[in-house]
Amino acid sequence: MTESKHALHELSQKLPKEKLLQAKKFGFSDIQLAHIFGVSQHEIRALREMNGIKPVYKTVDTCAAEFDAQTPYHYSTYAEENESKPSKKKKVVILGGGPNRIGQGIEFDYCCVQAVFAFREAGYETIMINCNPETVSTDYDIADKLYFEPLTYEDTMNILELEKPDGIVVSFGGQTPLRLSTALEEAGIHILGTSSEGIDLAEDRKKFGALLDKLNIPHPDYGTATTLDEAMKIAKRIGYPVLVRPSYVLGGRAMQIIYNDESLENYVKQALNVSDEYPLLIDRFLEHAKEFDVDALSDGKDCVVAGIMEHIEAAGIHSGDSTSILPPISVASSVIKTMKKYTRQLAKALKVVGLMNVQFAVQGKTVYVLEVNPRASRTVPFVCKATGMPLVKVACRLMLGEKISKLKVAYNLKDCDDLKLKHITIKEPVFPFAKFLKSGVYLGPEMRSTGEVMSFATTFGEAFAKAALAAGSKLPTSGTVFVSVNDGDKNERTVKIMKRFYDMGFDLIGTSGTAKFLQEHGVECKPVFKVGEGRPNIFDVIMLGKVQFVINTPLGEKSRFDEQSIGTASVLSGVSWVTTIEGAEAAVAGIEQLRKSDFGVKSLQAYLNYKPKKRK
C-alpha cells in the first residue's frame, strides 16, 4: 500500500493536477496518458480520483434551445455542472456493440433493444451505453437513459460510478463489451449473467482446450505461439492446413488459412502485437467439413437448445458470412443428438446464465467443437424470428435469477427439433464486393459481409430462391453454367447436380479437368481455358455475358489465389456464383422451384401460427 502511494506521489510530480485536468479537457484518455508516462491506466485513474478530476455529463439539446429538452441522452465532458441526475430506482446498465464496422454485426443491436424492453418489463430503469448513431439502441426514446460514450473501461467505469446500477449486462453487444467483463468484475461491478470467469474460460484457448479434453469432447488439434519458432513447431505437429488467428479477435479479423511454412512465416512477420499476453492461436483446419451454429439458453444447470443452423458453406468460412438453414435439412439425427449433448455439457461447465453460441464442425461421423461464445451471437435475431421464441427476453429473466423450468410454459421453450417447424428459414449474407473488387471475393475465416437477409418458405428450394433474390443474387432459369470443381468434389454428388442443370436445359462449360470428369460420367460439358492457358479464357467468356451462373470450388492456397479472376468477373458482370458444392446443390433446388411456379408471400405471424390475444 505504501509502495502504491509512493508511486502515485511520483506520478503526481510528473503530471500535476492542472496538467492532468488540461489533458483530460483536450481529450486524452487514461490509457493514452498511461502509455505516455509508462504506467497503467489504473494508476492514471487513481491519480484522477486523488485530484477529484471526474467527467460530468451534459444533455443533448434535441430542441436546439427553442424548448426545454427532456431527452435522457448524455455525453461526457470535463466541465463544472453535471446535468445527468441518477435516480434511486432499481437499474440495469446494458453495454451496446460499439461502432458499426465489418466484423461487428448490427444484429447485436436487436439484442440490446430487446433487453431494454425485457428489463423495463421486470421493473428496472434501463441505461444504455453505446456510441453508434446508426443503431436503434441509441434512439433517445428506447432506453430510460442513454450515454453516448465509447465502450472502454475508463468511460464505462465513469458512468457506473455515477449511476451505481444493480447490475450490468455485457453479453448482448458482441465481442466488444465482452472484453471488459474481467476488468469490470475486478472493479467490483456486478455482471448479470455468465461470470467473467466463465467468459474467460471460453475465450482463453488453453483453458478451453483443457476443458474440452476433460469433458471428452472432440476438437481440432491446436496450439498457441508467441514466436515464429513456436508457430512452426505447432504447425509441424498438427499438420497443414492450419487456421491462424490473433487471440480475442473481432469478426475473425486477421484470421487466415495457411498451407505451408513459407506462408506461415510471412503471416507471423506481418502479425501485430504478438506477445505472451496476445499469442497467436493455431488450429488444425478441417477441410471438407460441414459447419453448424447452435444457439442455446441456460440458467447454469438446465439448458434449451433454441436453434441449430446448418451452414451451406464448408467449415472455414466465418459464421457471419455463411448461408444458414434452420432447421437443418441434411444431417443425421445422431449428429443432432451429439451436438445437443455437447451444448448442454458446455453450458453447465461454463456456468452460462443467459444466451450462448456453440460452433461445430462435422467431418465424417465426428462432431468437433470449434468454439463457444457465452453471449448472444449474431444469429439470435434470426433464431428468434424463425422459431417464435423470445430468446433475449428469456435470457434477461434468467440473468435476474429465474429458472428455465419456470419459464418453459410461459414462453413455449423447446429444443428447436421439438418445435416441429413446418417451414424452412434461411439467413443469407450480403457482401460489398461490387464496391471493393480489389479486396477479393472468395470467403474465408475473416468476416466480409455487411448485412444479411432472411427468407421463409415451406420448401428448401423456395426459401433459397427468396433469400438469393433478397440478397441481390438473382438465380437464372436458363442459359449457361460454368463449373470448375476441385479434385475432392469430383464425385457422384457433383455429377447429379450438374445433370439436374443439364436436364433443365442449361448449357454447361467447365475447365478442362472438370469438363473431362463430367463427360466421362455422361454429362455434356464443353471445356474452356483457365486464365493463363489461352484466349478466350473463362474471364473473357464471363465478361462477354455468355455465362449466367458460376460454380467454382477452390481448394488449397494456389487454387484460391487463381480463382480470384473468376469471382471478379462474376461480380463485374452481375453473375450469381457459388463456391461450394453445397451451394451449388442449394442453387439448383432454388432454380427448379423458380421454374415450377412463382412463390407467394406470407406474414411472419402466419408461418408461426401466431394468434394475437383478444382485447377485453
Image (cartoon, rainbow, N blue to C red):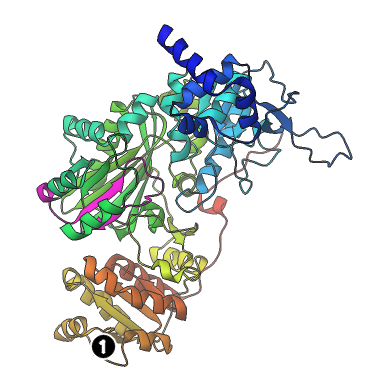
Q: Nearer the viewer, residue 253 or 396?
A: 253
Point 61% across, 22% down: residue: 91
Of all residues, the one furthest to the front in this rendering is 13
Identified by mark 1, the residue type is Phe
Of all residues, the one furthest to the top in this rendering is 2
Image quadrant where residue 347 sits: top left
Which stretch did the figure color magenta? 236-258
In the picture provided, is 440 more to the left or to the right than 155?
A: left
How many numbered callouts? 1
Residue 456 image offset from top left, x and y in percent:
48, 58
Q: Which residue is mark 1?
A: 529
Q: Is residue 121 visible?
A: no
Residue 507 image offset from top left, x and y in percent:
32, 88
- In the rendered image, residue 238 lying in the magenta stretch gets the answer yes
The C terminus lies in which quarter of the figure?
A: top right
Of all residues, the one furthest to the left in this rendering is 237
In the picture provided, is 443 more to the left or to the right than 72?
A: left
Q: Nearer the viewer, residue 610 or 259?
A: 259
The N terminus lies in which quarter of the figure?
A: top left
- In the rendered image, residue 336 lying in the magenta stretch gets the answer no
Residue 485 image offset from top left, x and y in percent:
23, 74
Q: Nearer the viewer, residue 360 or 271?
A: 271
Point 27% across, 52% down: residue: 269
Of all residues, the one furthest to the right in this rendering is 66
Point 16% across, 81% down: residue: 517
Q: Is residue 191 above or below residue 172?
A: above
Q: Nearer the viewer, residue 253 or 602?
A: 253
Label 1: state its secondary structure. Answer: loop
Point 47% across, 68% down: residue: 436
Residue 145 image offset from top left, x and y in percent:
67, 30
